[in-house]
Structure formats: C-alpha cells, structure tokens
Amino acid sequence: MKKLSIDEAAKYFNISKEGIHNRIRRGTLNSVVESGVKYVLLSDEKVSQNPDKFYNYLEQENGDLKRKLENLELEIKNLRDQKEQMLIDERIKIEQIYKERDRQLEVILSRFSSKTLPQHDLDETEVTEVVVEEAEIAYEQPLTHDDLVSLKDFLRLKQYSKERRRRIKKRFKKVAPSDERVIVIDKKLHLRPYHYNYSDLISD
C-alpha cells in the first residue's frame, strides 16, 4: 500500500489538487487522515496499472464531451434552419402584400385610363360636346362602390410627399360633412375622381 499526499497524488495523476479531492468525494480514490493531514492510499496494483486506467478515463471523458459537442452543433444547425425558414416565410408574406398593393394600384390606374378622354384630332366644338356628354352621364350615374377610390389610395397614386398628403387630408376632412364630392364610409374618406374635380382641395 502506497500513501501519497494530495500534492503528490496530483503530480502522480497529472491533475489538479481539486481533481484529487473530487475523486476522493466520488470514492474512486481511497484516503486516510493522519494528524490532520489527508493522504491518498494506492495499492501496489493501482500504482502499476493506474496510468492505463487514467488514460481510459480521459478517453471516456473525451468521448462524452465529443457527443455533447455534436449535440450542440446539431441544435445550432436546427436553430439556424428554423431562422432561415422564418425569414423565407416573412419574405413571402411581404412579397404578397406588395403584390396585392400593386394589383390595387393597377385597378385604380385602369379605371383612370378607362375614363380618360381619348386624344383624337377633334375641334374645340367636338371636345366641348364630348365633355358635356361625359359630365351628364357622370351626373346621372348612381353612386356605387366601384366608382369609389379611398383618399389614401388616391394620394398614394399621386406620389405626393408625406407633408403634402397630411395637408390634403386635413382639407378633405374639413369639407367632408358638406361637400358631396367627399363620401364617408366607415369613417374613411372616399372620392369619385372620374366624376368630380378635386383640384381646389389638392392644389397647394
């Protein structure tokens, strides 16, 4: 039986003194206290075989750490894949939103285009007659939702600055209760741009 101090045992096993105390607590090393000093007890067999056993222990520890590292890398990969999928989903949603807005603007533009007077070689009298006829038809047509364009979409189509849109909205809200050109639906302002002229409210 060989008796080693804590320092000697740490040098023998090539680990820290705390590692020796941990092994003693786990019961993998025998110890004895003499005159208030703790010693590690090693049998002659352990002394001769211990290097191989310690190497095997390190191999086992390395194997455990390697498996833990592989699990962590797998979790990181899964998190990265989830993040990429979330970004893809968000991008698809944003693209759909913009496509829907583009479609709405196309509808508005097509309505404007369909109501725009064709540019033919008409003399002044012919142009006047056509304009009057268009105005009479517009006046007689009943109000339908297909004729309406929200003020928000109308201003967006005009591509005005943010400050100018704010001023224009303020004017429309002010005249909405008394101006038949401004229609309020669910507290939102709507226009009939192919039936009425709004230049007095839009011009700065």
Image: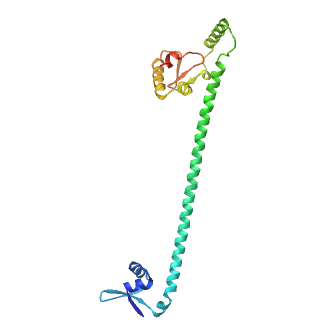
**Number of numbered discs visible in the structure rendering:** 0
Residue 91's spot in the image, x, y percent?
Answer: 58, 44
Q: In this view, which residue lies farthest toward the right? A: 121
Between 47 and 21, the one lying in front of the other is 47
Residue 129: image quadrant is: top right
Rendered image coloring scheme: rainbow
Answer above or below: position of 84 versus 202: below
Q: Is residue 136 left or right of residue 6?
A: right
Residue 29: image quadrant is: bottom left
Residue 59's spot in the image, x, y percent?
Answer: 53, 78
Residue 9's spot in the image, x, y percent?
Answer: 40, 85
* Residue at 57%, 54% in the rendered image: 82
Between 162 and 98, the one lying in front of the other is 162
Q: In this view, which residue lies farthest toward the left? A: 35
Q: Is residue 181 left or right of residue 21?
A: right
Answer above or below: position of 82 versus 182: below
Residue 100's spot in the image, x, y percent?
Answer: 61, 34
Q: In this view, which residue lies farthest toward the top? A: 125
**Quadrant containing the N terminus in the rendered view:** bottom left
Between 83 and 10, the one lying in front of the other is 10
* Residue at 59%, 42% in the rendered image: 93
